[in-house]
Amino acid sequence: MSYPLFQISFVVYFLAMAAYVGFFVSQNNRVRTVARGIFTTGAILHTLNIIARYFEAGHTPITSQHETVSFFAWAIAWGYLSFRWRYTVKNFGTFVSILTVGFMLIAALASREILPLVPALQSWWLPVHASISIIADGFLGLACIGGIMYLLQEREIKRKRFGLFFSRLPSLEALDKLNQHCLSVGFPLLTLGIISGSVWAKQAWGAYWHWDPKETWSLITWFLYAALVHLRFTVGWRGRPAAIMTIVAFLAVLFTLWGVNYLLGGIHSYAK
């Protein structure tokens, strides 16, 4: 039952993306309202998919490639909706829907086979650590989108050629605030995810830290975001440098999630 729900939510997300792109081009507010409604419907169906997958697997579905990437897309979708109810960011939904569909496509191409949990994963720490970490990554993904939008808008302003993006993207100040809001949620969750993972490692393997490749890259990623947050909130770092560093740090997130599994291996490489 879970996979048909996944397929339906994927199709609905795709329709939402098409509607958002249509709004981006036409700037018709009715199209935006329709796109938002479709995207919300996709997120609700996606939630039902994850719940159904939980009952099928008998554990939190965040252990395989299919499950992890699907949950990542879900976190991005609901992270966006949580912000959308509090802030209005012009055409943010267009970029978010594209990223969500991209992750759903990756999840659709991965094996959806349900495998028994290895002993180290048979713990109540699994839903705590994994869900917090991926939700954190979802908000950090939103910050990355804000950084990309900032660079696109800045490029048009500097060139003084006001084309497709200038009238359709928010002001640089609004995008900078969006980036800051996403970081203020994502970074504390990232920190909590690393702490919970360390406690779990102590219980599972007898030590808080093993310098496993995934642990090492998680720490590198944390330091990148810690530096960014420090520069933003204490030094007042803003603008282009902050946007670029947000994108670079999110690339580290993606490498930690997938690159480590395929290139470096280690005791955390369960979902190849």
Image (spheres, rainbow, N blue to C red):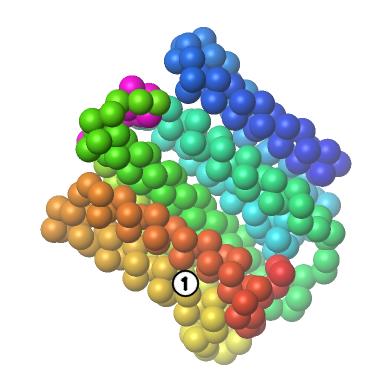
Q: Which quadrant of the rendered structure holds the C terminus?
A: bottom right
Q: Magenta stretch: residue 261 in it?
A: no
Helix, strand or loop at label 1? It is helix
Residue 87 lies in what quarter of the image? Answer: top left
Q: Residue at x 50, y 50 (%)?
A: 138
Position of 218 relative to 247 (above/below): below
Residue 101 lies in what quarter of the image? Answer: top right
Kindly report the secondary structure that dominates the magenta region of the rendered protein: loop
Determine if residue 174 is in view.
no
- Looking at the rendering, the stretch of residues picked out in magenta corresponds to 165-175
Horizontal and vertical percent position of residue 184: 32, 50
Q: Residue at x 15, y 58 (%)?
A: 234
**Pointer 1 residue:** 218
**Mark 1 belongs to which amino acid?**
Ser
Q: Residue at x 54, y 25 (%)?
A: 21
Q: Is residue 232 left or right of residue 212?
A: left
Horizontal and vertical percent position of residue 260: 58, 74
Determine if residue 258 is in view.
yes
